[in-house]
Image: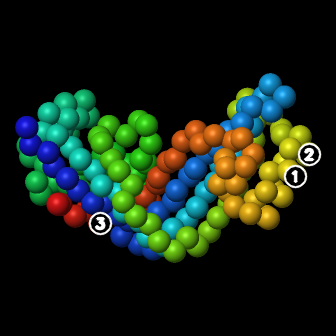
Amino acid sequence: MSVFEFNVSPKYKKSFVEYTIVQKNINDKNVKVKRELVWRQGEIEVKITEEEFKKYLEDKELNISKLEGNEHILFDSLKKEDVLVFDDKFPFEYEFLSSFDGCSDDYYIYYEDGSDVEDSIEEEINNVLEEGDFYDLEDDHGYEIEDTIYELHGELDIEKK
């Protein structure tokens, strides 16, 4: 069985975004903290078997006969609103390879059910973030990593391996 391997990165700087979500149950409510980290550049490896490629073509009704030379058509078909999202719904195997030079770091604190987080909890979380590091929530305060999602915005550089 053939396997196609690609390294995928955004063509332009500051177009690689990493979201990490941690969560903890406090007072019978799930508190989530989402970190949005914009990187100057990053790269993801994608592996696609020939069987997965054929099934994807059928499901999406794409009119290409082979993957080689049509990589951009395939990856563009995976985008939504010009964003390629790597999460648990991504149809192929992928692996984060690298990122460098984080240039923007934002945090969102919310309850899973959408209600407002109490000021005291939000203040406690913000203190941890200001005094230490995002991962201190996991290491020292009982939060668990729920998910990590990567987004590549705009045009892509696709390198066949």
Crowd tier of the residue under label 2, counting other residues whose Cα lies within 10 Å: few below 14, some 14–19, many 20 or above: few
User: Disc 3 on helix, strand or loop?
Assistant: strand
Q: Earlier in the sequence, mark 2 or mark 3?
A: 2
Three-letter code for the amino acid on which mark 2 is drawn: Ser
How many numbered marks does the figure carry?
3
Check whether the beta carbons of the residues at disc 2 and disc 1 lie within 8 A of each other: yes
Tag nearer the camera, 2 or 3: 2
User: In x, y percent, where is residue 143?
Assistant: 69, 42
Three-letter code for the amino acid on which mark 1 is drawn: Glu
User: In x, y percent, where is residue 98?
Assistant: 40, 64
Q: Earlier in the sequence, mark 1 or mark 3?
A: 1
Residue that label 2 marks? 120
User: Disc 2 on helix, strand or loop?
Assistant: helix
Q: 61 above or below 9? A: above
Q: Quadrant of the C terminus?
A: bottom left
Crowd tier of the residue under label 3, counting other residues whose Cα lies within 10 Å: few below 14, some 14–19, many 20 or above: some
Instruction: Say whether residue 56 is visible.
Output: yes
The residue located at (14%, 33%) in the rendering is 51
Looking at the rendering, which quadrant does residue 44 occupy? bottom left
The residue located at (75%, 59%) in the rendering is 129
Instruction: Say whether residue 61 is visible.
Output: no
Q: 90 above or below 124? A: above
Residue that label 3 marks? 157
Looking at the rendering, which quadrant does residue 144 occupy? top right
User: In x, y percent, where is residue 1?
Assistant: 8, 37
Q: CA distance from mark 2 to mark 3?
A: 45 Å
Residue lying farthest to the top in this orientation: 28
Disc marking residue 123:
1
Q: CA distance from mark 1 to mark 3?
A: 41 Å
